[in-house]
Image (cartoon, rainbow, N blue to C red):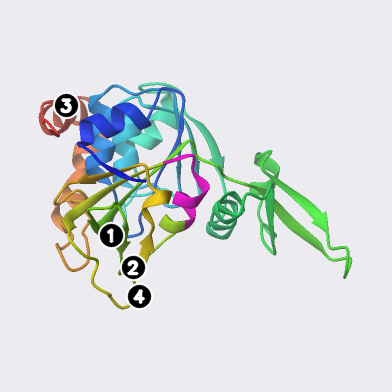
Amino acid sequence: MAEIRTLRGAVADLVHDGDTVALEGFTHLIPFAAGHEIIRQGTTDLTLVRMTPDVVYDQLIGAGCARKLVFSWGGNPGVGSLHRFRDAVENAWPRPLELDEHSHAGMANRYVAGASRLPFAILRGYRGSDLATRTDTVSTVVCPFTGEELAAVAALRPDVTVIHAQRADRLGNVQFWGLLGVQKEAALAADRVLVTVEEIVDELAPTPGAVVLPSWVVDAVVPVPGGSRPSYAAGYSVRDNGFYQAWDAVSRDRAAFTAWLDTHVRKESAG
């Protein structure tokens, strides 16, 4: 059953050096606060997994937390490149970064296979690109019924998945809604699950389109109002578009980035 924790304690207990860690969320509900706590704790040698690594992964990579990135698209949405990501790939700063790149469909199917406890998933994909030649997690299988050759992708089984959600009840059941990505699949695929939430409530009111993760899927629930900022949580906050625009200039320069990290992440306390 899920335990209601502090962010510092939950990250310390659930996220370890060398882990494969998925921080998922699509457009909103991106777990920035948890990502910042990982940075504060100096967790390192992580394999970071995300369908759309954006600014929070730029920060984790620039802080030296990551040795490898498993992903299907990377950028500052609506703005441009992730400059800390690019610096790590092109110049090995602050450390070299290994890449395992996939399509969105491939990544989603990898999570589904992991959640289903299957060794791989199959799809019609990867045709017309060289992605499959650059990874050992894509192969082909022949359908035993039709003879069709299909792409096969290895299951993703993160050591820990971290997501942000709107609310949880006092038993640790988690509810989230709005634009959803692969949070459910990533949580079910993981060995350990940490969820930050906008609030803890006595009862989860039915909400159209909501997904509920039962408490037995989740290890820790952490109340962190605004925990997805500068992204947003539908029904609770709005996206800080100015931050994403300003991040382009901050992240282009190593000294400016380091100063930002020291001021806005490392010196803050998560409680």
Placement of 92 over or under 86, stated as above or below = above
Separation of residues labelled 2 and 3 (CA atoms): 30 Å
- CB within 8 Å, label 1 to label 2: yes
Callout 4 environment at 10 Å: few (<14), some (14 to 19), or many (20+)? Answer: few
Amino acid marked by disc 1? His
Describe the element under mark 4 as helix, strand or loop: loop
- CB within 8 Å, label 4 to label 1: no
Residue, disc 2:
179
Placement of 149 over or under 70, stated as above or below = below
Q: Is residue 190 magenta?
A: yes
Amino acid marked by disc 4? Gly
Tag count in the figure? 4
Q: Which residues are magenta?
A: 185-192
Along the line of sight, the residue nearer the viewer: 27 or 78: 27
- Residue 200: quadrant of the picture: bottom left
Separation of residues labelled 1 and 2 (CA atoms): 7 Å
Residue, disc 4:
209
Placement of 52 over or under 125, stated as above or below = above
Residue, disc 1:
28
**Mark on residue 266?**
3
Q: Earlier in the sequence, mark 1 or mark 2?
A: 1
Callout 1 environment at 10 Å: few (<14), some (14 to 19), or many (20+)? Answer: many
Amino acid marked by disc 2? Leu
Who's the residue at 35% across and 22% down the image? Answer: 94
In the picture, which quadrant includes the C terminus?
top left
Callout 3 environment at 10 Å: few (<14), some (14 to 19), or many (20+)? Answer: some
Who's the residue at 35% across and 55% down the image? Answer: 25
Q: Earlier in the sequence, mark 2 or mark 3?
A: 2
